[in-house]
Amino acid sequence: MISRQSTEARLANTTLGIRVDRPASLVTTGLSLFSVVGGNVLVNLILGEVTVVMQTTASAGTLRHHPTTGTILDLAAAVEWSDLHVGTLLTIDSVRATNIQLVTGLTLLRGQSAPVILTPGHVELAMAAPMTGQQKYSIWYKPLDELAYISTPSVDNLSVSSQEMLTNMQLGIRVDRPTAVATATVPIYTVTGGRVAINLLLGEVTTALDAGANLCTLAAHPTVGALTNLATTVDWDAMAIGTLISVSGVVGDALQVGTGAVRGQDVPWVMGVGHIEPVMAAAAAAGRIKWSLWYTPIDTDAVVTAA
């Protein structure tokens, strides 16, 4: 018989993804908590806990992503870490302007409102001044690329096949579209056979896009019916290699764009037979973008293919 503990662990992994724990250690600015290796990952939750009380000296702290290529990015606005007591929990909201969440005990601790996508690099501490005290951290994630994983110096990771299986359990069937020039109204994906739920759509710039204003978004273009924009437009002017592109799934939100990290999809969207395509002010963006999409069929014969 499977124990309750192992069942709960499996359920947590199915929902939140693969868990990696980092043992308690002295907090220092720039300390690497986790390494993202081999590709992009979808982070569903980062949770810290104070294990040795923090000193009373004033020092604001936060977590940040330090990509292998690109600009260091704070994952939340810094808050004061002085005199944090043992048992204080820390997490992020995933909306970068939101303060890091702090609470002693479990009452009203806010988790992530949406996943965040991270490129290869490190998740690290950032503090205004050195402090004493210790914190431990756990992270739950799903790999978006075949060889992607998160590690700490003391953790053995699941095999790639196990990671892929866990990702598919939550995000659905993955379809990759090879890198190509981004061109207005040229489909990137085709839906046939019925309705599907799109759980995540992720683009990555592989060749820098041309300089010059070019307001762009993505749209669902049904075989029967009107084209629907999946997000409001943003300027694709001179997008650099490694820039990530996604949609939140919330009607009226802007297209999500970031270097090193980008907001993931809050909720799936449902579409019928048709295409997903770029909508661009200019005819083309000259550079190249690769795409990955994860979906769940709603109708028996529904399929998504790269166009």
Image (spheres, rainbow, N blue to C red):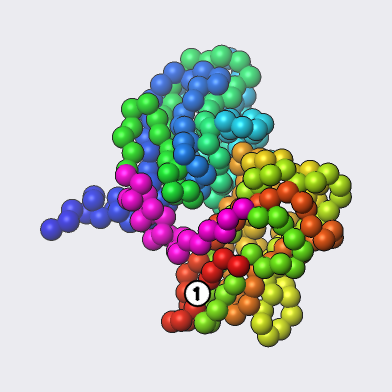
Q: Residue furthest bottom?
A: 224
Residue at x 25%, y 55% (from the top left corner): 7
Residue 221 is covered by the magenta coloring = no
Q: Residue 216 at x, y = what percent?
A: 78, 58
Q: Quadrant of the N terminus?
A: bottom left
Residue 161 is covered by the magenta coloring = yes
Q: Please state which of residues 284 and 57 is positioned toward the viewer in this rendering.
A: 284
Position above or below: 263 against 75:
below
Q: Residue furthest left?
A: 1
Q: Quadrant of residue 249?
A: bottom right
Position above or below: 88 against 300:
above
Q: Amino acid at mark 1?
A: Val
Q: Residue 146 at x, y = what percent?
A: 44, 48
Residue at x 23%, y 50% (from the top left corner): 5
Q: Is residue 303 left or right of residue 208?
A: left
Q: Quadrant of residue 98?
A: top right
Q: Is residue 21 left or right of residue 243?
A: left
Q: Residue 87 at x, y = what percent?
A: 41, 32
Tell me which segment is drawn in magenta.
159-179
Q: Is residue 115 left or right of residue 147?
A: right
Q: Residue furthest right?
A: 213
Categorize mark 1 by other alpha carbons within 10 Å: few (<14), some (14-19), many (20+): some
Residue at x 63%, y 58% (from the top left corner): 248
Q: Please state which of residues 125 and 144 is positioned toward the viewer in this rendering.
A: 144
Q: Residue 115 at x, y = what percent?
A: 54, 50
Q: Quadrant of the C terminus?
A: bottom right
Residue picked out by circle 1? 303
Q: Is residue 86 left or right of residue 131?
A: left
Say if residue 7 shows up in the picture. Answer: yes
Position above or below: 276 against 157:
below
